[in-house]
């Protein structure tokens, strides 16, 4: 099994003058290719901080992080940004689409931004991804004309654009009605199953967690539970 993520002894302390707040306390975590993993925990447990560290948006105070076989501890900010763009995909609770861009332009953005424009190949892949997520009739719609569920499906397509090794989803269904949430979750499971994509999904929703093959639980900055389970096809 290919190891996608290995985090060892991850700690995070935030400082405000002489005051220190310890948010993560010695997290050890691994993810293998093709896993669909839920990260659970109450507000303030450290979930968002851990996701930010794994997503290279935040540096840990201590510990080591290996992603796709590469130790990234000593990466410069530029190297981290390049790695994040090429090897990681992100889906947030709020889709963060560019409102003046079409669905296709939003999906192509992770590849187009470093290249300075959208190539024919990028456009073709973006079209294929939008068709995959059931939005072939919304390809040229501006983001402002899409529903909440449609915007989140565009966000999933965008996360897949660069064929990332790991997709980090932070409350991806938290801002959707139940029907839209079910469709987004079903889509992520389909991509996981058919493409072997690896997902780490942060959620408060036990129903979402129940659809994942492994459940991790954080409490007070510590990983207190790591449970694998069989999920229905």
Image (tube, rainbow, N blue to C red):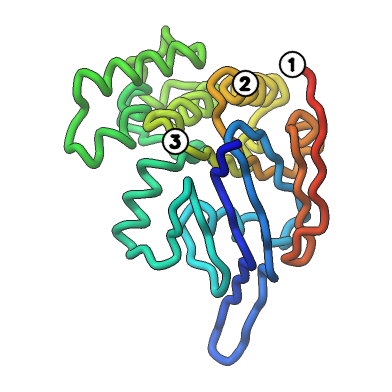
Extreme residue toward the bottom, this view: 18
Up/down of 91 relative to 181, above or below: below
Q: Residue furthest top?
A: 137
**Judging from the image, what secondary structure is the residue with disc 1 in?**
loop
Secondary structure beneath dot 2 equals helix
- The residue where tag 3 is placed is 164
Residue name at image x 45 percent, y 59 percent: 71
| Alpha-carbon span between mark 3 and mark 1 | 23 Å
In this rendering, the answer to whether 134 lies above or below 59 is: above
Can residue 11 be seen here?
yes
**Which percent across, then down, holds residue 223?**
76, 59
Measured as percent of width and height from the top left, residue 208 is found at: 74, 33
In what quadrant of the picture does the C terminus appear?
top right
Q: Earlier in the sequence, mark 2 or mark 1?
A: 2
Q: What residue is shown at x 78% (from left), y 55% (from top)?
A: 42
As displayed, is residue 59 above or below residue 158?
Answer: below
Q: Is residue 180 left or right of residue 125?
A: right
Dot 1: within a 10 Å radius of its alpha carbon, few (fewer than 14), some, or many (20 or more) residues?
Answer: few
Query: Which residue is label 2 attached to?
Result: 193
**Between 101 and 136, which is closer to the camera in this rendering?**
136
Earlier sequence position, callout 3 versus callout 1 = 3
Q: Which mark is residue 233?
A: 1
Q: Are marks 2 and 1 in contact (CB under 8 Å)?
A: yes
In the rendered image, which quarter contains the N terminus? top right
């Amino acid at each position: 099994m290919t190891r996608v993520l290995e985090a060892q002894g991850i700690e995070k302390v935030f400082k405000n003058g002489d005051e220190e707040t310890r948010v993560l306390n010695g997290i050890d975590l691994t993810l293998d290719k093709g896993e669909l993993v839920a990260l659970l925990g109450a507000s303030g447990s450290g979930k968002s901080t851990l996701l930010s560290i794994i997503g290279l948006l935040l540096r840990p105070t201590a510990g080591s992080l290996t992603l796709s076989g590469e130790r990234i501890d000593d990466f410069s900010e530029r190297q981290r940004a390049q790695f994040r763009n090429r090897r990681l995909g992100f889906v947030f609770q709020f889709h963060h689409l560019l409102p003046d861009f079409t669905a296709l332009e939003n999906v192509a953005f992770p590849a187009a931004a470093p290249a300075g424009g959208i190539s024919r190949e990028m456009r073709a892949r973006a079209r294929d991804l939008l068709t995959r997520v059931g939005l072939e009739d919304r390809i040229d719609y501006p983001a402002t004309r899409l529903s909440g569920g449609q915007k989140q499906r565009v966000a999933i397509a965008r996360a897949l654009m660069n064929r990332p090794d790991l997709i980090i989803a932070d409350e991806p269904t938290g801002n959707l009605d139940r029907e839209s949430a079910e469709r987004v979750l079903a889509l992520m499971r389909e991509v996981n199953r058919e493409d072997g994509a690896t997902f780490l999904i942060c959620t408060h929703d036990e129903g979402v967690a129940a659809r994942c093959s492994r459940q991790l639980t954080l409490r007070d900055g510590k990983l207190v539970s790591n449970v694998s389970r069989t999920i229905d096809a």
